[in-house]
């Protein structure tokens, strides 16, 4: 079983990808891309956990311009967690996702528009009064 914070991260990344595709290309193209991923065995709920496969399918289908979608998705993900995306278009986006995920887990970061999470994972133990 995955911790709630990891599931939230994956849900947030899925939402960022879908939002970026729809904002850049429109609802019809977004639906077509989701169908393309589905035909390649990638369900919508698996986008974040199989992001390397998503990138491969998009690159195979659209060529290098697919990297723009990936880059925008990663920058949106950083914004969602109120983090500065201090990387360039040419850097490894896989590494940037891993770094953000590590920070989200270690610092218990919440996404701006994420699903509700059990607040108990964010609450620190109360200080004892002396």
Image: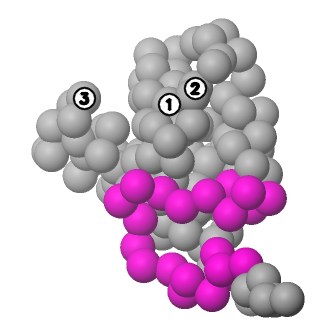
Quadrant containing the C terminus is: bottom right
Query: Residue 29: image x %, image y %?
Result: 21, 40
Instruction: Classify residue 97 as left or right of residue 27.
Output: right
* Residue 75's disc number: 1
Q: Is residue 123 inside the magenta stretch?
A: yes
Residue labelled with disc 3: 24
When the figure is inspected, residue 19 is found, relative to residue 4, above or below; the finding is above
Colouring chosen for the image of the structure: one colour
Q: Earlier in the sequence, mark 1 or mark 3?
A: 3
* Residue 7's disc number: none
Q: Could you tell me how far apart the alpha carbons at marks 2 and 3 are, in whole angstroms?
A: 19 Å
Q: Is residue 34 visible?
A: yes
Viewer-proximal residue among 130 and 50: 130
Q: Residues within 10 Å of mark 3 (few under 14, many from 20)?
A: few
Q: Earlier in the sequence, mark 2 or mark 1?
A: 1
- For the image shown, how many numbered marks are present on the structure? 3
Q: Are marks 2 and 1 in contact (CB under 8 Å)?
A: yes
Query: Residue 61: image x %, image y %?
Result: 45, 31
Q: Could you tell me how far apart the alpha carbons at marks 1 and 3 are, in whole angstroms?
A: 14 Å
Q: Residues within 10 Å of mark 1 (few under 14, many from 20)?
A: many
Q: Is residue 59 inside the magenta stretch?
A: no
Q: Could you tell me how far apart the alpha carbons at marks 2 and 1 are, in whole angstroms?
A: 6 Å
User: What residue is at 22 percent from the left and 35 percent from the top?
Assistant: 23
Residue numbers of the magenta segment: 104-125
In front: mark 1 or mark 3?
1
Q: Secondary structure at mark 1?
A: helix
* Residue 85's disc number: 2
């Amino acid at each position: 079983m995955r911790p709630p914070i990891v599931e939230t991260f994956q849900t947030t990344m899925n939402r960022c990808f879908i939002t970026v595709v729809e904002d850049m290309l429109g609802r019809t193209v977004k639906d077509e891309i989701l169908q393309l991923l589905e035909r390649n065995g990638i369900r919508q709920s698996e986008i974040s956990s199989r992001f390397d496969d998503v990138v491969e399918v998009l690159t195979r289908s659209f060529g290098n311009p697919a990297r723009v979608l990936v880059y925008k998705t990663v920058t949106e993900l950083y914004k969602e967690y109120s983090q500065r995306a201090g990387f360039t278009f040419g850097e490894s986006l896989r590494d940037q996702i891993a770094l953000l995920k590590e920070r989200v887990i270690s610092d218990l970061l919440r996404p701006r528009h994420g699903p509700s999470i059990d607040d108990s994972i964010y609450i620190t133990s109360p200080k004892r009064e002396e």
